[in-house]
Amino acid sequence: MDAKFRKLEVANVAGKKDDPNYAVVRGHVPADLYKEFKFFCVERNVDNSEGLEQLLKEYFEMKKQKPKKKA
């Protein structure tokens, strides 16, 4: 085997964890809701972080579009 293939170098790519523009969100939810969330992520082929980001964006966008109720 050629020497150049014996040693592979992995690029050091900074992830969201190290990005100051991202923050951690954490909490406990009912097991059935967690399963539904996991299914959401699998359907979209995303990890938990990306899935949560998508859901939060969708929620807040939907909330912005709803007319505010008058008291």
Image: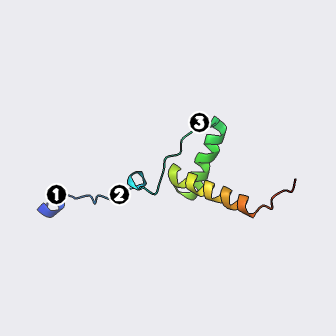
Whether pointer 1 and pointer 3 mark residues with C-beta atoms closer than 8 Å, the reply is no
Q: Amino acid at mark 3?
A: His
Q: Is residue 20 visible?
A: yes
Which secondary structure lies at badge 3?
A: loop
Question: Disc 1 vs disc 3: which is toward the camera?
Answer: 3
Closer-to-camera residue (8/71): 71
Q: Is residue 55 left or right of 15 when viewed as pictured?
A: right
Quick one: label 3, few (<14), some, or many (20+) residues within 10 Å? few
Q: Quadrant of residue 27?
A: top right
Separation of residues labelled 1 and 3 (CA atoms): 45 Å
Q: Residue 30: x and y, percent?
A: 65, 35
Separation of residues labelled 2 and 1 (CA atoms): 25 Å
Q: Residue 28: x and y, percent?
A: 59, 36
Q: Is residue 2 visible?
A: no
**Residue behind mark 1:** 6
Quick one: label 2, few (<14), some, or many (20+) residues within 10 Å? few
Which secondary structure lies at badge 1?
A: helix
Q: Mark 2 or mark 1, which has the lower sequence index?
A: 1
Quarter occupied by the N terminus: bottom left
Q: Mark 3 or mark 2, which has the lower sequence index?
A: 2
**Residue behind mark 2:** 14
Q: Residue 71: x and y, percent?
A: 87, 53
Question: Disc 2 vs disc 1: which is toward the camera?
Answer: 2
Question: Which label is found at residue 28?
Answer: 3
